[in-house]
Amino acid sequence: MTRRPVITIDGPAGAGKGTLARRLADHFGLPHLDTGLLYRAVGLKAEKTGRSPVEIAAGLEPSDLADPELRTDGAGQAASKVAVIQEVRANLLDFQRKFAAQAAGAVLDGRDTGTIICPDAQVKLFVTASVEARAERRYRELRAKGVDTIKPRVLAEMAERDRRDSERAAAPLKAAPDAYHLDTSDMDADAAFAAALAFIERKGFRSSGP
Ligand code: DC
């Protein structure tokens, strides 16, 4: 591979973007940024300290990204709430654009990486799945971690987050016009990876690895 691509992956919670992003980054040897983690860090710190999310976003520190609580559903909801604030988004923009501009190329996953962060990315994927399929996956993950919950609650929280992320005025979740759509409702992680890889290879990008 001579050119180093920027690959963006957007879509709703639970569609499989994170797993796909990590696998593609690994396959192509590209640095990966989970942009949702930035919003999670802002949301969680704002909840814990009572400080303004706008201020927190302006001075996010590496240690903020290491909190084990960032992966919880509570942090996901907190992230979705601060993500509607335009100034929060503006304060996180520079970091994300710089990450995407590195010579090594990059994989970014989130909600607006193909539309706002990297409108010129060579490869854009929009990964979706039905809300039922996403809630079912999330429910199984939570149960496997020993979290006591019920399916209707997981489904309702997911639908609420979808609505907030898609209906907000600032950079709502939507597919870029040139994004490749991948519906993973009936796919496992291997099938989603194979479909994404086939699309990327059709664009002329190949792994330089063995
Ligand atoms: O991908 P995730 O579940 O970690 O994202 C958590 C929340 O952060 C999501 O509900 C909306 C927000 N987010 C965003 O607004 N823009 C992004 N690029 C990534 C996440």
Image (tube, rainbow, N blue to C red):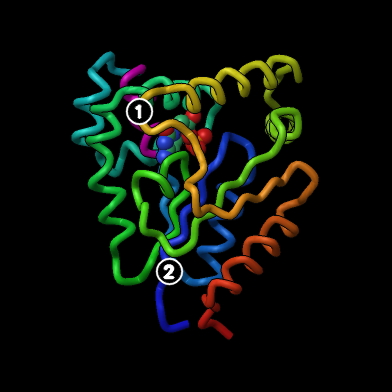
Dominant SS of magenta comes to helix
Across and down, in percent, residue 109 comes to 47, 48
Q: Which residues are magenta?
A: 38-47
Across and down, in percent, residue 85 comes to 31, 23
Residue in front for this viewpoint, 198 or 25: 198
- Position of the C terminus, as image quadrant, is bottom right
- The numbered disc on residue 5 is 2
> In terms of image quadrants, where is residue 157?
top right
For marks 1 and 2, the one nearer the N-term is 2
Whether the residues at callouts 1 and 2 have beta carbons within 8 Å, the answer is: no
Please determine whether, in this image, residue 179 is positioned above or below residue 207.
above
Residue in front for this viewpoint, 197 or 24: 197
Residue 131 lies left or right of residue 176; in this view the side is right
The residue type indicated by label 1 comes to Ala
Please determine whether, in this image, residue 71 is positioned above or below residue 182.
above
- The numbered disc on residue 128 is none
Residue in front for this viewpoint, 35 or 2: 2
- The numbered disc on residue 170 is 1
